[in-house]
Image (cartoon, coloured by chain):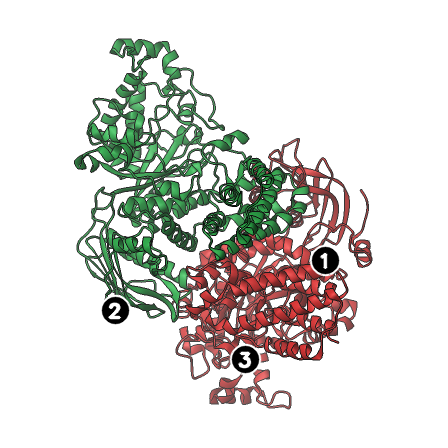
Chain colours: A green, B red
């Protein structure tokens, strides 16, 4: 083996662009060394299990072989063969898992020689991770499919690597949940945080309190059998499932079902709009704690993981402030106004959480909640999930709590993979913590809130960007080269479609819907210049409801345009006198112009896309400016003030958003304008 | 209503190209008249059932609403509302169906006004067809989705409109079968002919003879519950299911399971290769008829349709000729050699079929079989399926039998939709039959044999071409404008993806598999110049087996290139001095050249596609010739003999096939060469 540690590779890569790239693994392993040669993968490929083995590992191997068949088209025997003498992949585990525990040993070692592959792990869960690494290494080569000779030692940086899915605002059918879990396993996420109740719906069948689903779900809920099946499906993939039932706010659906749990006035119907609403559970009613005891008792059986998420976020306190009953309760319990807590609600919320925590503990659960649950008196083994940021997180950790980060990883905000990738749970305020304190930062979770997605579009909002977050949570902190991340994320993105994710293929049907009988290629080309507006800006284009059709061009456009990203790189290189990059940029601009010119017949007769007409005009003008600038770069001439003034006007106009879409080449073209202005 | 019969439209269309096209319906209705205005389809859309109604119709309406939601993104109430006063679609049926009968009344009448839609049918099956017509009319328009005002009177030309699926050579999972039925319903096919046994496998669970599946299927078979579910699934969509168990030849799988049924020597293992093999059932053994009686008795319960297909095709007779036992039997029964039947096998086969027919009749079934089963003495109510052509078909019909046509409609031969579309059961020899005789030609069936397809690729081989055959069987004979057919087939093709067919989206994953980490767009562009070889030519590139990976570029290329078809039309127009068409043709050629030039890095390191290297070179040369020719057309110059000689050489060389692919622009470019040669 030609030993080459990742660190050296990265150091070298900054000096020379032409070093052969490492295989497109994501998350990148902790240590990788490329060898010489490769191992061919053909129909003779067999897997042998040695050492400790169990049914979960066997199923994992079968699943890997099914994926390998999809990826290669070769029909593999889908059973591991314990006795095969000629196995190409030999798996050995030392001992059994203690499944679903935080801090399992997830490490593995993976060695490919030209004659065999050895995958070693302490426990099956590590072997499962190694199988995903193996799948990412298989590629077509000069002699059919192969894996390169390589030596990998790998283990995660953080023990808690999660993805939160909101099944409340838009219900997500079981098949969506399953394929989300498939994607998670592929990039070594190990926690599925399932947001199961909110103002818009309560999503789990309760047999103890059936009105939760009969009244509170609008008919859209998971049966207990489905929940069990998902928990097992996740466990098979090394993923813990942590349910979230958000209380005391975000509870309209629960309270419509059981109004007696509410502080008056109880809500009368589940919400179809989104936002922070007033209804809340009433912490002064003894019946509430009886309800929670029974309800949590039931759910504790359904969700075997130790942790249980009670939400606790974004409660506006209005009904508590205005209720005479609550005011009296506060007085009786001494929850008196202070400067920090002018209405005593914070103290009352803490009281509620303390009682809630005791109920959870009774049922064998540890509490998890958002930043707002933190209050004196809660035991130190709870977990704080921070949507507020590293400061809030490190405050909690400094006080002795455990925490995970979600700030910076809200996938619904449509930020770039780069933005998410460069967030680190141990940066900012958390960097000042002691090493011992830092160990209480368990990891983090990407969060997929579902105001603006449907089962059709959600894959494109989770993937592939979530893979960048998965890498941040698994790989060494030093791995942060953005360009290489994008190269590898592209490969992962492609592979995810083979296991059933639809984040790429969804676009075609959406464009066809918009285009009617028209051709979609021009629309697809034009769409490469566009990105959805970011953060919460989409709300400015009209409110979403749970039943608003999300079928506009913005819904058919990925969060990031790969073409625009490549264009930006070419523009920067072109400005630094790279003639090939300049030619590529021009070719791209001409392609976009062709797409734009091909559009009019589509726009004329179709209300679904007619709103993008102004964007098209801005884009066309902007591309003309860019082509002028590239011509000037080529000839070495500077362009005059008049041209610059016109171009800046075009540039400014092209910053306007329409139908929740913006032109995403604007910044690059601004650089071009500057580069050729005299 | 502006009355306009289809006949007049077609007549007019031949005179003027610019008449507004009819909506992209397929099959085109018997009578259609466009009105003024349109009806908007929004979330308020409701369906009302009046007159006779039943559960099947209700389910059909629910299914239509689900499809409508997929197509529009609007969430519709998925239940018909019998009481809705404000329904936009009012369905009324006169009376119940007699389900699964040949010659049901499938007619319907469909009227759209700007305020409501009326769908009237004699029976629910007609209403189901009308719902499919409705779905084809919904399109995005100036005010959201709408349907145009229209008046349609429709009924099928033929009562038997089938698609045969071979689940024996390559087993097709249930989800493939279901989506095939979905596609069939969309274009009004009404017979699903299921080829369930052949040399490579026996595909249905038998409880009476379980070795059929345990030994004869390689583990790939449908359980009885699955079969019942498919039969119900089809019936819900107005589709009869006719099973085919092919005997006495094509029986290796059955005879490996039950060797005592075979004429010696029995086969010892099921075939993995394809072809016509020797093993056959032995018609001289009494046990064979006992077996068939029990087996057919069991299957007759599973498949409720009156007709039962016994295959009977392609028996080579070898084992019968060589068996002493069979020779003695022939002598004993007087099956003596004649000029037409030199070995007496034809007479023996007729004897076998006569006994088989009696068994079928005992179990309430009428016999159906391929051309070869026809023999004197069989009752006239059997159905002959002709793979041999209109002559064989009309011979059978002339002798008093009923028949259906499959010749010309073998989808596995990768012919063009046009080729299939222009086949007519009543053409050629059948045209000479008396009108009374012609009524015994019940219709026809497209046939999908599965030597060269897998569950992954089969959709692309069935669809959208089968839609052209569906139209031939449903619509009036006079509707045969090929260009308009392609326009409408393109719309149907798009819609089929919305109901779950993968004939378009399959390509992306296949190209990604081939491309590894490379970009697929250049490969996709180049592939537009290619088509799979036709007829049985693929066999020349190596034998298929049941386990050969079908993952090469040929498997990722549709049977017909739409881009090449458009190019051919542009070339013809360009030769007739259409400057716009000439520019389009040039743009297309430049796009292909860009794709070709982008390919090399892909080809160098990848054995899966390296075989197309020579094609790429031929294509590049050929495109250069074509660009020369277009330039000459534009300048009005003729090109010299030397150019012509060179061009013809390039043209000839580009006719060579590689990796079962051929360049499909060759003919158009030949015309160009001629047009500009001096």
* Dot 1 alpha-carbon crowd within 10 angstroms: few under 14, some 14 to 19, many 20 or more: few
How many numbered discs?
A: 3
Q: Nearer the viewer, residue A625 or A662?
A: A625
Please determine if labels 1 and 3 lie on a single subunit: yes
Mark 3: secondary structure: loop
* Dot 2 alpha-carbon crowd within 10 angstroms: few under 14, some 14 to 19, many 20 or more: few
In the image, residue B279 sits, relative to residue A354, either above or below, namely below
- Mark 1 vs mark 3: give the one in front: 1
Contact, mark 3 vs mark 2 (Cβ under 8 Å)? no
Contact, mark 1 vs mark 3 (Cβ under 8 Å)? no
Quadrant containing the N terminus of chain B in the rendered view: top right
x 71%, y 77%: residue = B640
Rendered location of residue A594, percent (x, y): 61, 51
Please determine if labels 1 and 2 lie on a single subunit: no
Pinpoint the chain carrying mark 1.
B
Res B275 visible: no
Rendered location of residue A156, percent (x, y): 25, 47
Q: Nearer the viewer, residue A536 or A581?
A: A581
Residue marked by disc 1: B580
Residue marked by disc 3: B315
Q: Is residue A363 left or right of residue A516?
A: left
Rendered location of residue B617, percent (x, y): 54, 72
Q: Is residue A4 left or right of residue B125?
A: left
Pinpoint the chain carrying mark 3.
B
Residue marked by disc 2: A84
Q: Nearer the viewer, residue B349 or B611?
A: B611
* Dot 3 alpha-carbon crowd within 10 angstroms: few under 14, some 14 to 19, many 20 or more: many
Mark 2: secondary structure: loop
Res B545 visible: yes
Instruction: Identify the image quadrant of residue A75.
Output: bottom left
């Amino acid at each position: 083996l030609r030993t080459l540690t990742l660190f050296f590779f990265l150091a070298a890569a900054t000096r020379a662009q032409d070093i052969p790239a490492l295989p497109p693994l994501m998350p990148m392993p902790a240590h990788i060394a490329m060898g010489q040669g490769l191992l061919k993968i053909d129909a003779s490929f067999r897997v042998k299990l040695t050492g400790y083995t169990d049914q979960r590992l066997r199923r994992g191997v079968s699943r890997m072989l099914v994926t390998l068949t999809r990826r290669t088209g070769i029909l593999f025997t889908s059973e591991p063969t314990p006795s095969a003498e000629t196995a190409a992949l030999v798996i050995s585990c030392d001992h059994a898992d203690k499944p679903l525990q935080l801090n399992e040993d997830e490490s593995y070692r993976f060695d490919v020689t030209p004659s065999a592959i050895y995958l070693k792990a302490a426990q099956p869960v590590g072997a499962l991770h190694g199988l995903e690494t193996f799948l990412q290494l298989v590629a077509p080569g000069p002699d059919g499919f192969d894996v390169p000779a390589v030596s990998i030692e790998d283990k995660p940086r953080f023990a808690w690597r999660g993805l939160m899915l909101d099944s409340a605002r838009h219900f997500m059918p079981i098949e969506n949940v399953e394929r989300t879990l498939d994607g998670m396993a592929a990039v070594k996420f190990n926690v599925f945080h399932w947001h199961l109740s909110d103002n818009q719906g309560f999503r789990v069948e309760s047999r103890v309190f059936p009105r939760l689903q009969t009244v509170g779900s609008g008919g859209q809920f998971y049966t207990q059998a489905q929940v069990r099946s998902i928990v097992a499906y996740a466990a098979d993939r090394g993923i813990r499932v942590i349910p979230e039932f958000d209380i005391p706010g975000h509870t309209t659906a629960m309270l419509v079902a059981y109004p007696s749990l509410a502080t008056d006035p109880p809500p009368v119907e589940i919400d179809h709009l989104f936002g922070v609403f007033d209804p809340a559970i009433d912490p002064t009613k003894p019946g509430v704690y009886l309800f929670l005891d029974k309800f949590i008792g039931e759910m504790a059986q359904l969700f075997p993981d130790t942790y249980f998420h009670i939400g606790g976020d974004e409660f506006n306190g209005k009904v508590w402030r205005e209720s005479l009953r609550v005011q009296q309760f506060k007085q009786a319990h001494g929850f008196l106004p202070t400067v920090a807590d002018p209405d005593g609600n914070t103290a009352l919320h803490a009281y509620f959480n303390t009682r809630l925590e005791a109920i959870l503990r009774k049922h064998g659960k540890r509490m998890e909640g958002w930043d707002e649950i933190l209050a004196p008196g809660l035991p130190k083994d709870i977990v704080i999930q921070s949507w507020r940021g590293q400061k809030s997180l490190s405050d909690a950790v400094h006080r002795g709590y455990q925490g995970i980060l979600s700030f910076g990883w809200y996938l619904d905000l449509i930020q770039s993979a780069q933005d998410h990738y460069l967030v680190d749970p141990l940066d900012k305020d958390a960097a000042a913590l002691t090493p011992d304190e830092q160990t209480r930062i368990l990891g983090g979770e990407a969060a997929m809130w579902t105001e603006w997605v449907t089962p059709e579009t959600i894959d494109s909002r989770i993937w592939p960007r979530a893979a960048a977050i998965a890498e941040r949570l698994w790989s060494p902190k030093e791995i942060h080269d953005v360009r290489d991340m994008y190269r590898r994320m592209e490969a992962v993105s492609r592979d995810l479609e083979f296991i059933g994710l639809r984040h790429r293929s969804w676009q075609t049907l959406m464009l066809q819907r918009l285009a009617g009988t028209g051709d979609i290629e021009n629309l697809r080309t034009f769409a490469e210049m566009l990105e959805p507006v970011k953060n919460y800006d989409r709300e400015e284009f009209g409110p979403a409801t749970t039943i608003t059709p999300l079928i506009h061009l913005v819904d058919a456009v990925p969060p990031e345009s790969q073409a625009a990203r490549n264009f930006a790189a070419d523009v920067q290189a072109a400005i630094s006198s790279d003639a090939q990059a300049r030619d590529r940029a021009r070719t791209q601009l001409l392609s976009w112009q062709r797409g734009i010119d091909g559009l009019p017949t589509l726009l004329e007769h179709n209300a679904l896309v007619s709103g993008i007409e102004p964007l098209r005009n801005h884009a066309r003008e902007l591309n003309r400016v860019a082509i002028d600038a590239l011509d000037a770069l080529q000839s070495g001439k500077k362009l005059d003030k008049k041209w610059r003034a016109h171009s800046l006007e075009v540039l400014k106009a092209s910053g306007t958003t329409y139908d929740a879409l913006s032109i995403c080449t604007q910044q690059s073209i601004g650089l071009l304008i500057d580069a050729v202005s005299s």
